[in-house]
Image: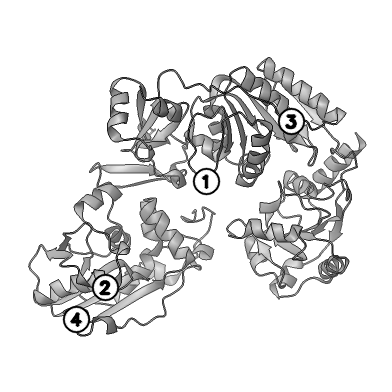
Amino acid sequence: MNEQLQQFLSGRIWLREHTPFPREVIDAHIDSGHIHLKPGITTSTEPNLFWQSKKNVCNRCHNTNQSYFHSFNCARCNQICTYCRHCIRMGRVSSCSELLLWDKQHARGANAHVFAWNGKLTPLQQKASEELLSSVERNESHLIHAVCGAGKTELLFPAIFASLQAGKRVCVAAPRTDVILELFPRFQKVFPNTTIHALYGGAPDQHGFAELVLATTHQLYRFERAFDVVFVDEADAFPYYADETLQQAVTKAANPDAAIHYVTATPTKSLKTTNQSVLTRRYHGHNLPVPRFDSLWGYTRKLKKGKIPPKLEAWINKKVEMKTPFLIFLPTIEMLENFPSDLPRVHAEHPYRKELVMQLREKKIPGLLTTTILERGITIENVHVAVVGAEQPIFTSSALIQISGRVGRSVQYPEGDIVFFHHGISREMDKAQDAIEGWNRA
Amino acid sequence: MKCLICGAPYKSPPTWSKLFLYELDSSTCIRCFGKFEKSQSVIDFADFRGTPFDGAVDSVFSLYSYNEAMKEYLHQYKFLQDVALATVFAGKLQQAFQSKEGIVVPIPMHPDKLVLRTFAQVDELLNAAQTSYQHVLSKITTEAQGKKTKKERLKTTNLFEEIQTIQPTNYILFDDIYTTGATIHHAAKILKDAGAKRVEAITLIKG
């Protein structure tokens, strides 16, 4: 048995043509029963009332939405071949491609784990952290419901260390690449002797067997029955809550008897856990800034005509004068691209997103226009925030709570202006405001 | 419908030409399609003057220029093998071929390469555009043109050979991208030498 192959494939479901091992090595392990082969797509015909309908399932991402499947004349298998467009960015999975699964004893880590963290938890964090730890020890699922800026990552550390010590394989998953990139160096410092892999789209190759995996939820499509403990951070972030296959991916990547723990600021009803802890205070103890509502009637028409509505213009000018960095959230990419101003702007497809956020932090630019892409995960000292068109459906209460959570995160500037410019107040805006006021009262 | 490129739902507006002229429906939203730039550059054959390829091609028409959006598109279509994307330019390609007369000849792939890629990207573009074509040529080398310099590309001995008799009529070569023009000239020369009257070329992209 090839040990490197075992380490690589343990817990993974991997496209054969993407495996970094020679063909003969893989063939030998298939013959000896170490590797199990699965077809890329399973197609079944279901008899309907009047006709027969074909149903495809992608065996990697478990997508069953038929509109994501496309069939064509394949020159490799000389048949009509179907492939999954849903997970195509990870390499195409089609009817004639083979997925490899490790079918024997999984690899194990041989590291003696060290816990090198001497930070202090606030009493509230401490309590939540202990509750989580005892849930992890009893293998019961746990929900940490914490406001933005409560210091959620730190309170995971003791539970993760305990799991690693017990010889378990641990996964920390988050929907967004930016979060994984931020977590990776912190975890490397806290667990210096542990093999940690950070997996996200475009990540470099990492070798050996990782006892701790930090991954975007998308990357979990490539795992099956791999982890004994899973923590899902930012479980309320797009696209996780909106994409059912991502939620399935988390369950699929975990062992059937593994507990899955969630960390979120705005839990949805679908998150069901045995235990939960609530953190309503920021780590610095100050109140959360409460969003105020301000009307901006007919802003779409004004912006289309190439004019900034006077109230918004006054807000921007004031922030520029006071030299306070600011973010303006806009509902659509079109509105962002056509906004009549020379302020820099970022959206999901923008190549210099990280650089522009850095420039805002260093006060090289006065402010930034953005879509909901910057709604979470970023910390800019003393930032003030305006949401334009807060009544639009893209701004759900959880998005608005996250956006408000950008303000007042540092101890030096625990307050700041957060304003929802609207063309009529929506229920979601009210819900967000109520939730924030509720936490401040608690 | 969902946009094939960004996945966002969109409605394609009904038009008279779709109803009466059977114009093909687009498979992307207006925002994604708007990112492709129409090619403005005029292609001349100055580089080929004095070479054996002089006069092999009578005209070349490219629809789009090679920009960031096109690079992304080609990556997903050819490298990630997303065959469904062949339909993105179906309508525009169909129009381009309707305005010309002659036998359409796609630039062929080497059979080994075809098995690796699982589909012939040039043929699939034509299939999507509902344009009929003939395989008149076959590729005999497996070297990729993209890795060679212009001089090397021209020096290369025959890239193709004919597999059918060529008639004394008009031919329209079709390829996905026109970079230095070596591929198109190699193919055109074989057709001209075998008796083709006129050889034109259409490419999706001017690189």
The residue that mark 1 highlights is A201
Task: Name the residue located 76 percent from the left edge and 55 percent from the top edge.
Answer: A390
The residue carrying pointer 3 sits among few (fewer than 14), some (14 to 19) or many (20 or more) residues within 10 Å by Cα, namely some
Front: mark 1 or 2 = 2
Q: Chain of mark 4?
A: B
Specify the subunit that label 1 lies on. Answer: A
Say which residue label 2 marks. B151
Asked if the residues shown at circle 4 and circle 2 are in contact, with their CB atoms under 8 angstroms apart, the answer is no
Q: Amino acid at mark 2?
A: Lys
Query: Looking at the image, what colour scheme do you see?
Result: one colour
Identity, as a three-letter code, of the amino acid under mark 1: Gly
Query: What's under tag 3, amino acid-wise?
Result: Trp
Image coordinates for residue B33, horizontal then vertical, percent: 48, 65
Which residue is the site of mark 4? B51
Q: Under tag 4, what secondary structure? A: loop
Are both tags, 4 and 3, on one chain?
no
